């Protein structure tokens, strides 16, 4: 198992681009305000458009890897970045009626960029060092977001919300240019199959990897819980007398701890069983929301944020790396898309589900959130133990005659 020295130079170059792109990608924070303020749309109409845009984002995450597996991950990243950037630049000039199509298309491309970034890390970093590679990517993205959020507020206050959309689009186009210059080129991926057998489909590959299936389902539910942080948590704190500034400081704590600890944690824990680490992280997320049953004081809110942040550090990077380690080479992009999609499922589902429960039974929201996250963590830990036991049994029994052929080998090219 390696350290940060084993992370290839191309990954560090990509991470710098991700930092820059994240620093200018602040439009989603102010989208709703832009639609209701400068566009003058009704709140309900703005909600529908924002929701459709979120669907586009999740769909891009789910499907972007397919394009990478078929046409090359580098080529997919560049194409999606150009489309996303161009879409954001022209968005302010698009008539209101066309926003229902233009916004989800732009966000679809942004989702595909995210999936392509992950796939590029997966195929570029050697086995045993993927946790560190994905940690570098996450730290770069979080650092950019930490810079970008206040920068977006400053630009919108001094100029307008329209300007930040144009700036985001131009920044994404510059990211595409930068990526084209620094990422190594290559031919379209080619697959070698014994006796020219076709590669198994992604669902067949998933069924052969039950621990990955358990992980994906667990992350799906955990993300709905985790993203209450951006929907019902600020409402809950505000209803109990905590103002917006305090919530902003809580988010700042999250970003600061991640920037300081995520990379060192990935290196220190690189030899530990990944599913156990992921499961513990999900349990900590559950405990963070469980703390809110004690009230909404500043002390409780800080304790919640520290637990959530610790859980995020433990589960997000190892989970991404685990999916990459388990993926067959010919389906690396599609495996990364599946993980990317479930890991943003809460963008769509967390606000309506959490909001409805908070409206009808506010006392149930935090205990239920805690139970769901802890159960997800427990399922992942149990899957890891069963997987290790099965691996030991298979090793003890020796090779089985008539076993299925080895997974086809993909020549590692970024495309």
Image: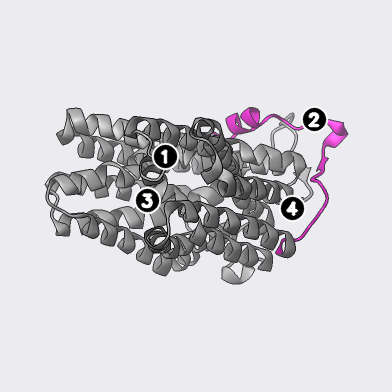
The residue identified by callout 1 is 347
Q: Which residues are magenta?
A: 182-210
> Which residue lies under the disc numbered 2?
198
Q: Which callout, 1 or 2, points at the residue further toward the start of the chain?
A: 2
In the image, residue 194 above or below residue 78: above
Instruction: Look at the numbered disc 4 and give the secondary structure of its residue.
Output: loop
Q: Return the disc, 4 or 1, that comes first in the chain's sequence.
A: 1
Query: On the image, numbered disc 4 is attached to which residue?
Result: 414
Q: Residue at x 43, y 40 (%)?
A: 219
Mark 3–mark 1 CB contact (< 8 Å): no
Q: Earlier in the sequence, mark 3 or mark 1?
A: 3
In terms of sequence position, does the residue under pointer 2 or pointer 4 come before the other? 2
In whole angstroms, how far apart are the C-alphas of marks 2 and 4? 21 Å
Residue 273 visible (yes or no) = no
Residue 14 visible within the image? yes
Determine which residue is flagged by label 3: 281
Residue at point 46% right, 47% down?
Answer: 275
Circles 2 and 3: CB atoms closer than 8 Å: no
- Of the residues under marks 2 and 3, which one precedes in the sequence? 2
Determine whether the residue tagged by mark 2 lies in a helix, strand or loop: loop
Q: Residues within 10 Å of mark 1 (few under 14, many from 20)?
A: many
- Image check: 119 left or right of 22? right
Instruction: Report, in whole angstroms, how far the alpha carbon at label 4 lies from the one at label 1.
Output: 29 Å
Instruction: Tell me, yes or no, whether the highlighted magenta stretch contains residue 204.
Output: yes
**x, y percentage for residue 105?**
58, 37
How far apart are labels 3 and 4 at the CA level?
Answer: 31 Å
Quarter holding the N terminus? bottom right
Q: Residue furthest bottom?
A: 5
């Amino acid at each position: 198992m390696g350290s940060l020295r084993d992370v290839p130079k191309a990954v560090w170059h990509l991470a710098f681009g991700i930092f820059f792109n994240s620093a200018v990608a602040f439009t989603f924070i102010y989208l709703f305000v832009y639609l209701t303020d400068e566009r003058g749309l009704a709140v309900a109409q703005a909600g529908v458009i924002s929701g459709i845009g979120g669907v586009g984002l999740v769909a891009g995450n789910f499907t972007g890897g397919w394009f990478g597996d078929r046409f090359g991950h580098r080529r997919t990243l560049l194409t999606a970045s150009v489309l996303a950037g161009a879409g954001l630049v022209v968005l302010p000039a698009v008539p209101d009626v066309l926003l229902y199509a233009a916004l989800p298309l732009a966000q679809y491309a942004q989702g595909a960029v995210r999936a392509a970034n992950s796939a590029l890390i997966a195929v570029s970093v050697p086995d045993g060092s993927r946790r560190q590679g994905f940690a570098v990517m996450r730290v770069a993205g979080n650092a950019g977001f930490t810079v970008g959020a206040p920068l977006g507020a400053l630009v919108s206050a001094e100029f307008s919300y329209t300007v930040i959309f144009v700036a985001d689009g131009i920044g994404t186009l510059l990211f595409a240019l930068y990526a084209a210059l620094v990422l190594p080129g290559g031919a379209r991926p080619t697959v070698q199959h014994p006796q020219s057998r076709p590669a198994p489909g992604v669902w067949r590959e998933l069924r052969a990897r039950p621990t990955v299936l358990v992980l994906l389902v667990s992350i799906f539910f955990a993300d709905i819980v985790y993203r209450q942080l951006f929907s019902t948590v600020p409402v809950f704190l505000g209803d109990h007398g905590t103002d917006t500034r305090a919530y902003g400081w809580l988010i700042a704590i999250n970003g600061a701890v991640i920037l300081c600890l995520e990379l060192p944690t990935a290196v220190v824990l690189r030899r530990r069983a990944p599913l156990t680490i992921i499961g513990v992280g999900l349990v900590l997320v559950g405990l963070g929301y469980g703390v809110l049953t004690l009230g909404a004081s500043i002390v409780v809110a800080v304790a919640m944020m520290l637990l959530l942040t610790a859980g995020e550090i433990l589960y997000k990077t190892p989970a991404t790396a685990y999916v990459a380690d388990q993926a067959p080479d010919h389906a690396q992009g599609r495996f990364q898309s599946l993980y990317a999609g479930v890991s943003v499922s809460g963008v769509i589902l967390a606000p309506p589900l959490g909001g409805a429960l908070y409206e009808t039974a506010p006392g149930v929201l935090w205990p239920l959130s805690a139970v769901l996250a802890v159960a997800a963590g427990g399922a992942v830990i149990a899957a890891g133990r069963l997987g290790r036991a099965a691996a030991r049994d298979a090793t003890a029994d020796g090779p089985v005659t008539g076993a299925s052929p080895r997974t086809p080998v993909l020549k590692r090219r970024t495309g």
